[in-house]
Image (cartoon, rainbow, N blue to C red):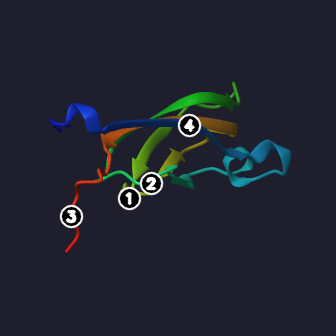
Amino acid sequence: MKRLRNYLIGVEQGQKILFADFEHGGPMWTGSGPRIARAEIAFSEPFRQPPVVHAGLAMWDIDRDSNQRADISTEAVTETGFQLVFRTWGDTQVARVRASWLAIGELAHDDDWHL
């Protein structure tokens, strides 16, 4: 469990369209096998330490005639941002995905000393 000082808690949230491959015949829509899409997300201001980041699917448009496989996660979380990562595999055909995210962490304070 991460303990936070109550007056220094920062919460930031957002959404990101990761891809819309049906528009141009991209690999998530026309491909098969393992596929991955990544998006760099920058926080509006830095956290004191890397925050806890939760990601979820806000919208997905997926072909009904194939298996529905999806994995959404975060990677490379730092004080200033992270990567949203969407994966699929097999015969799954994904037209588009919008991900939502929520970051919770400790904010920098004027009393922080940097030597």
Which of the two labelled residues, at mark 1 and mark 4, occupies the earlier sequence position? 4
Q: Which residue is drawn at 55% across and 44% down?
A: 90
Q: Residues within 10 Å of mark 4 (few under 14, many from 20)?
A: few
Determine whether label 1 and label 2 are within 8 Å by CB: yes
Horizontal and vertical percent position of residue 98: 63, 36
Q: Quadrant of residue 95?
A: top right
Tag 3's secondary structure? loop
Disc 3 vs disc 4: which is toward the camera? 3
Q: What residue does disc 2 label?
A: 82
Question: What's the residue type where badge 4 is placed?
Answer: Gly
Tag 2's secondary structure? strand
Q: Quadrant of residue 112?
A: bottom left
Determine whether label 2 and label 4 are within 8 Å by CB: no
Task: Establish if 83 lies above or below 60.
Answer: below
Horizontal and vertical percent position of residue 32: 63, 50
Which of the two labelled residues, at mark 2 and mark 4, occupies the earlier sequence position? 4
Horizontal and vertical percent position of residue 10: 37, 38
Q: What residue does disc 1 label?
A: 76
Determine whether label 3 and label 4 are within 8 Å by CB: no
8 or 59: which is nearer to us? 8
> Is residue 66 visible to us here?
yes
Tell me the CA gap for discs 2 and 3.
25 Å
Q: What residue does disc 4 label?
A: 14
Tell me the CA gap for discs 1 and 2.
5 Å
Which of the two labelled residues, at mark 1 and mark 2, occupies the earlier sequence position? 1
Q: Which residue is drawn at 68% across and 31% down?
A: 62
Tag 4's secondary structure? strand
Figure label count? 4
Which image quadrant: the C terminus? bottom left
Determine whether label 2 and label 3 are within 8 Å by CB: no
Task: Establish if 100 lies above or below 40.
Answer: above
